[in-house]
Amino acid sequence: MYRVFEDRRSAGRALVPELERCKLGDPIILGLPRGGIPLAFEIAVALHAPLDTIVVRKLGVPSQPELAFGAIASGGIRVINDDVVESLFSLDDDTIERVAQREMTELRRREQAYRLDRPYPELGGKDVVLVDDGLATGATMRAAAEAVNSKSPSSLVVAVPVGSASAVDKVAAIVDRVICLESPASFYAVGQFYVDFGQTTDNEVRELLRTAWELTDRGAAEEHANE
């Protein structure tokens, strides 16, 4: 029997002990919006680490929007699930490009909505932790991981409460470590592992990021004052 989490924030707290065992030297927590941000917030607060986000968009099959054939991320990163594309005759090159362009428009909108003019953090030499509320196909997380790897982090850990075995394996191949609390054979959807899996709103994402940034900025100011 697998564990069921009350909501995303409780799932984030459940990940903290596993991340503490990693003994990260200079961590930064990156949540994938929107669902990954509540978990990432709890982790960042517990680890006294800065929180930020990397915007990633799933590329869904037009006739089955929940089925991802790939994903895109900030920085022009695009990941394609070849097994899904090859299994669907409807996914020709024109369809793939049309979906990718539509999602790129939304990606840019979300970058502006969440981050405003705040510069992206420096990831080089950092212990980066990528957080989401679960891995179904893994395409979204793989796109995020490739984007982060291009910034030369010291290490890259992916932390999720739940995931399918195949998705965990795919992600593990391109990061240093995957922490996944539940990965049963009877995996159907991420939502089956939550009591409350209501949609995270843009406003909630903005509020959590703003709160975390205020804590980080205040801590940096206090540290500077004590030097």
Image (spheres, rainbow, N blue to C red):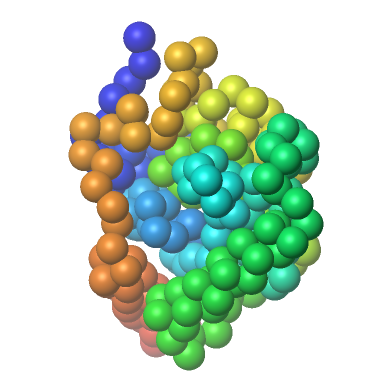
**Image location of residue 154, percent across then percent down:** 72, 56
Judged left or right of residue 198, residue 107 is right
- Most foreground residue, 219 or 8: 8
Q: Whole-percent x and y of residue 1?
A: 35, 9
Residue at point 29% right, 56% down?
A: 200
Q: In the rendered view, tell whether residue 54 sits above or below residue 60.
A: below
Q: As displayed, is residue 84 above or below residue 124?
A: above
For the question of whether residue 21 can be seen, the reply is no
Q: Is residue 172 left or right of residue 201?
A: right
Query: In this view of the protein, which residue sits in the foreground, 32 or 68?
Result: 68
Q: Residue at x 42, y 52 (%)?
A: 36
Residue 206, given in percent of the width and then of the height, sits at: 32, 73
Where residue 57 sits, quadrant-wise, is bottom right
How many numbered discs sit on the rendered protein? 0
Picture layout, residue 197 above or below residue 18: below
Q: Is residue 8 left or right of residue 75?
A: left
What is the x, y in percent for residue 115?
A: 45, 80
Q: Residue furthest top?
A: 1
**Does residue 174 show up?**
yes
Furthest-front residue in this view? 90
Seen at 74% across and 61% down, the residue is: 94
Residue found at x 59% / y 23%: 165
Q: Residue 15 occupies which quadrant of the picture?
A: top left
* Of residues 76 and 226, the one drawn nearer to the viewer in this rendering: 76
